Amino acid sequence: MDLPTGNGVTTKGAQIKTVLPNALNNIPDALYQMLADANGGELASWVMSCMINTSANQLVYALRDLAGPAGAVYRFYNSDSGSHFYTTSVKERDDIVANLPHMTLEGRRFITEGLGTALHRFYHTITDAHFFTTSQKEKAYVEASFSQFVYEGVATYVYTDPTGTNDQGVFRLYNEDTGQHLFTASEAEADNVQNVLGWKLESAKSFYVEIA
């Protein structure tokens, strides 16, 4: 199992089970005696083996939970601009958490399969907001008409039509006052943003994802 540990490094489960025994081999005698005392005064090889396997498995599960499921889309709230940012990159997620205090991680919002149609990402240099689209026509229009938008590449790949019973259409909403967009797979959030905040619904099926 390959595990992205959150700092851009991929760790294999087998590597974890190699590192832990090496670490235990370097335990000082005094600490080893404490471990032995805690286990009835002796520390048989099979007990050590169980400790290693248990610790390794716990670490593997912890790293897997930290990384999140493959294709997880993380959403941030930008308190300076009031906009939202989305990324599938664990490294980018962790870099933002560590270095940009005005960006609040709201967690996983949905899951993409990493297949299908490219989801293009733009950055607005004036408002510090991001825009996403699967439309090649819209991408070309933004690039040709709005110099303040910088194309940042493909964010991930998504389906523009449902492929299974668990697929959910993503709502795309637009704030006519600020020019910001919101993407959400939650119908309740989409309704609230429209009815309470006055945003305009541009599409209820801008692309399809799985609920996180």
Image (cartoon, grey):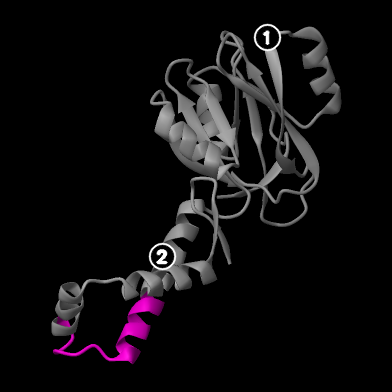
Quadrant location of the N terminus in the rendered image: bottom right
188, 136: nearer the viewer? 136
Magenta stretch: dominant secondary structure: helix
Amino acid type indicated by mark 1:
Gln
Q: Point out the frontmost of discs 2 and 1.
A: 2
Q: Which residues are magenta?
A: 38-54
Say which residue appears at 47% left-offset and 67% top-offset: 16
Task: Answer left or right for 120 relative to 183.
Answer: right
- The residue closer to the viewer here, 44 or 144, is 44
Callout 1: SS? loop
Most foreground residue, 190 or 99: 99
Left or right position of 178 against 154: left
Whether residue 94 is in magenta: the answer is no
Residue 109 position in % (x across, y down): 54, 42
Residue 37 in picture, x, y percent from top left: 13, 83
Q: Position of residue 181 (x, y in %)?
A: 61, 22
Displayed quadrant of residue 183: top right
Mark toward the start of the polypeptide (2 vs 1): 2
Q: Is residue 140 left or right of residue 80?
A: right
Q: Residue at x 50, y 28 (%)?
A: 192
Q: Tell me: residue 172, above or below residue 91.
A: above
Residue 80 in percent (x, y) is at 44, 16
Going 43% across and 72% down the picture, which residue do you hit?
57
Residue 53 sits above or below residue 158 on the image = below
Judged from the image, the secondary structure of the residue bearing numbered disc 2 is helix
* Residue type beneath disc 2: Leu
Mark linked to residue 59:
2
Cα distance in 3D space between marks 2 and 1: 44 Å
Please name the residue that numbered disc 1 is placed on: 148
In terms of depth relative to the viewer, which is nearer, 6 or 75?
A: 6
The residue depicted at 42 percent of the width and 61 percent of the height is 62
